Amino acid sequence: MLTPRGLQQRSHLLQAVRSFFFSRSYLEVDTPIRLPVIIPEAEIIPIQSEDWFLQTSPELCMKRLLARGCSQLFQICHCFRRGERGRLHQQEFTMLEWYRTGWSYVELMHECEEMVRAVTAQLAAEEDAQADISIHRAGKEISFASPWQRMTVQDAFQCYGGMSAGEAVGKGVFDQILVESIEPNLGWQRPVFLYDYPIGLASLARQKDDNPEVAERFELYIGGVELANGFSELTDPEVQRQRFAREIGRAGDGDTQQSMPEKFLQALADLPDCAGIALGLDRLLMILVGAQNIADVLPFSESDL
């Protein structure tokens, strides 16, 4: 449970995020959190609300707004994922998500870096620190100075995983190696963008034009903690339908079984080229204030209720 000082820090973070996006003419939106159908993802278990679901992400609704003519959107909202508990997980958490038409994941990585640096500088000013700062985590100093590191998934697996990313996917150990061997090594000198994921892990990301084996997807890591997941958005409804069908098939007949989001797929045909990203604000605050557990930066964690 946060102290009054912690609540003030959290409030300053939210204000700094909004200030950054308003300064760039982004439109803030607030879409429904209770939905009849959500993104089919075999690894994410939604929380039901009667015969509907609490959102795992605002992605479906925000992309439908882009398809209706909006060009720059952001949203700060609560998302829900069943069974996610631990040092870095809560079943209810705060997500920042934003989208920009006419961009790819390259421009989005740059803006993500600018946003985190701007927010960090604004929070640091509250402590009379310099704008270009370093943070300390686990006894190590992490510089936020630009440019941040970029590393391909393939290079990360070769460096830390002992095999290629494609081999890890083929053996069904990609996630295990990523979590156990790669993530703990990322973002300790300065933040790092891990990019170009195998196409089989594309999710809603676009295939890379000059390398069909990978998708234009990236994740941001600071001090071994994954903070954000972004990509150049897939705009082909038929390819997206095929990917969703695979996810529904992988989920089987258990609690993760989901329906096809037909209205979203219809809108996808009108979606312009764009890029989007989801960033965990609770994790970002945890990093910036030196907390070790996500529960330490929440007004109320599950155990407090």
Image (cartoon, grey):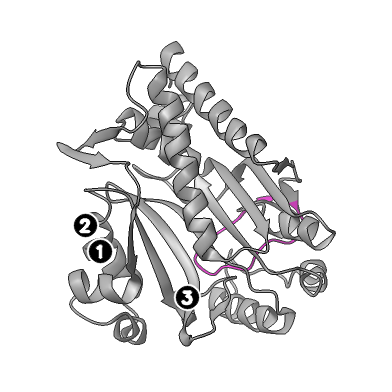
Tag 3 near tag 2, CB within 8 Å: no
Identity, as a three-letter code, of the amino acid under mark 3? Leu
Q: Is residue 152 left or right of residue 56?
A: left
The residue located at (41%, 17%) in the rendering is: 126
Identity, as a three-letter code, of the amino acid under mark 2? Asn
Q: Please rate how many residues cluster around mark 2, counting C-alpha atoms within 10 Å: few if below 14, some from 14 to 19, many from 20.
A: some
> The N terminus lies in which quarter of the figure?
top left
Q: Quadrant of residue 6?
A: top left
Q: CA distance from mark 1 to mark 2?
A: 6 Å
Q: CA distance from mark 1 to mark 3?
A: 16 Å
Q: Please rate how many residues cluster around mark 1, counting C-alpha atoms within 10 Å: few if below 14, some from 14 to 19, many from 20.
A: some
Residue 299: x and y in percent read 49, 24
Q: Is residue 185 left or right of residue 2?
A: left
Q: Is residue 299 left or right of residue 159?
A: right
Tag 1 near tag 2, CB within 8 Å: yes
Disc 3 designates what residue?
201
Residue 268: x and y in percent read 76, 71
Q: Please rate how many residues cluster around mark 3, counting C-alpha atoms within 10 Å: few if below 14, some from 14 to 19, many from 20.
A: some
- SS under mark 3: helix
The mark nearer the N terminus, 3 or 2, is: 2
Check if residue 39 falls in the magenta segment: yes
Q: CA distance from mark 3 to mark 2?
A: 21 Å
Mark 3 vs mark 2: give the one in front. Answer: 2
- SS under mark 1: helix
The residue located at (65%, 41%) in the rendering is: 24
Q: Which residues are magenta?
A: 35-50
Disc 2 designates what residue?
185
Mark number, residue 182:
1
